[in-house]
Structures are given as structure tokens and as C-alpha cells.
Amino acid sequence: MTKQIIRKIADDTDIVGSHETIKLGNFRHDRNLEHGKEEWLTPPEIIQAFGPFDLDPCAPVKRPWATADNHYTIEDDGLLRPWQGLVWCNPPYGPKTGDWLARCAQHNNCLALVFARTETQWFQNHVWPHATSLFFITGRLSFYHVGGEKGGTAGAPSVLIAYGKLADQRLRDNQTIAGQHLQNLPSKLIRLHLKNQTNE
């Protein structure tokens, strides 16, 4: 890393409570200085609009509000634990996002919140082929620190992904969060539909 980039990162570092926020490009990333963990909390209005949920398998250890009736934290390793009921999943954003979405697709009764990065491999592999529907949120969300303080605006737009009929119904029933609902046709069905049209 060049000295110029290091200086740029240092200039874009702020302290908010027990958190250090580092701006890389247009994305401000939060680090918990107290515990060395990096966590974004779901805005409470999202949980209120689309809940209630039976389980949050990737909840923060310390949380100012409940996101579901039951929670798994990093200490429980929610990827390996059993999932039940309607699951809320705001996964850690990074190299393991695809693992969490693969588990959401397998459970097929889940509503997930991720960045709308449709070009990524995890989106191509675990969203388009399996999701029932998607809801692209208008504008950009502001996520929260574990202390309950509102953070800055996220550096990318967000999308809610419904896996299964119940999660899809929650997206359809939404009347408070602005956005665009999109019914998804898994890729196998699209190919089959196009093939049938060709044969006609």
C-alpha cells in the first residue's frame, strides 16, 4: 500500500463512540474498537416493516433491539446451527456472503438483506437461480452501530431477497419502505420457457 493511500485512509478515519469509521472510496466501513469486530446493524424500520421473524442466524453479540424471536451470534456459528421458521438474514458483507445466501436458498423460508451487487458471483450463483422475489430499496440505507447509534449512508444500494412463499408475501405486503418489487424466475425456468417458445 502506498504512503499516499495510507494518508488518505488516515484522513478519512473518524471515531464515533467505541467505533472507528474508515472511508474507502464511497463506502464507509465500521470497526468496533472495543471488541475488534466489524458489524453493521439492520435499521429497525426494516425489521418493523417486514417482521416478525423466528430466527436471526447472524445477529450481533450486543444488539440494541431484537431482530427475531431467536438469535445466533458469531459465537454460535449460525451457518452450522439448525434454522427454523421464517429467518431474517443480514449477513456479514465480504467473502462469506455467498455461503449465507446458499444457506438461505437451502432453507427456502428466509428474507435476506444484502447490497444490490448483481454483478457478483454470489448474486449470480445464490440469488437469481433460487430467489422467489427481490425488493430493491429506494435510495441507500443507513446502518447502525452496536451501541444503537445511526451510521452514515451505505456506499451501495440494498436489496431484500425472498426465498420461499412467506418471505415473498412479506415483500408484497410492505407499505412503508419505498422500493421496487421484482418477481424472480429462477434461471432453469427461464431457459425452459425460452425453449418452449422456440418450439412453438
Image (spheres, rainbow, N blue to C red):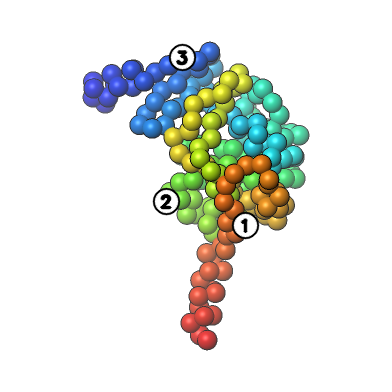
Q: Is residue 72 above or below residue 168?
A: above
Note whether residue 195 is visible. Answer: yes
Q: In this view, does 130 lie above or below 20?
A: below
Q: What element carries label 1?
A: loop
- How many numbered marks, from 0 up? 3
Of the numbered discs 2 and 3, the one sitting upstream in the chain is: 3
2 and 1 marks in contact (CB < 8 Å): no
Residue 37's disc is none
Name which residue lies at 68% across and 52% down: 172
171 vs 5, left or right, is right
Q: Which amino acid does label 3 sit on?
A: Ile
Q: Is mark 3 on a helix, strand or loop?
A: strand
Note whether residue 56 is visible. Answer: no
Q: In which quarter of the image is residue 8?
A: top left
Name which residue lies at 69% across and 33% down: 67
Where is residue 24 drawn, in percent x and y?
A: 37, 29
Q: Which amino acid does label 2 sit on?
A: Glu
Between 193 and 179, the one nearer to me in the picture: 179
Name which residue lies at 48% across and 82% down: 198
Per the image, the residue denoted by label 1 is 132
Residue 15's disc is 3
Per the image, the residue denoted by label 2 is 119
Q: Is residue 52 above or below residue 146?
A: below
Where is residue 55 drawn, in percent x and y?
A: 71, 38
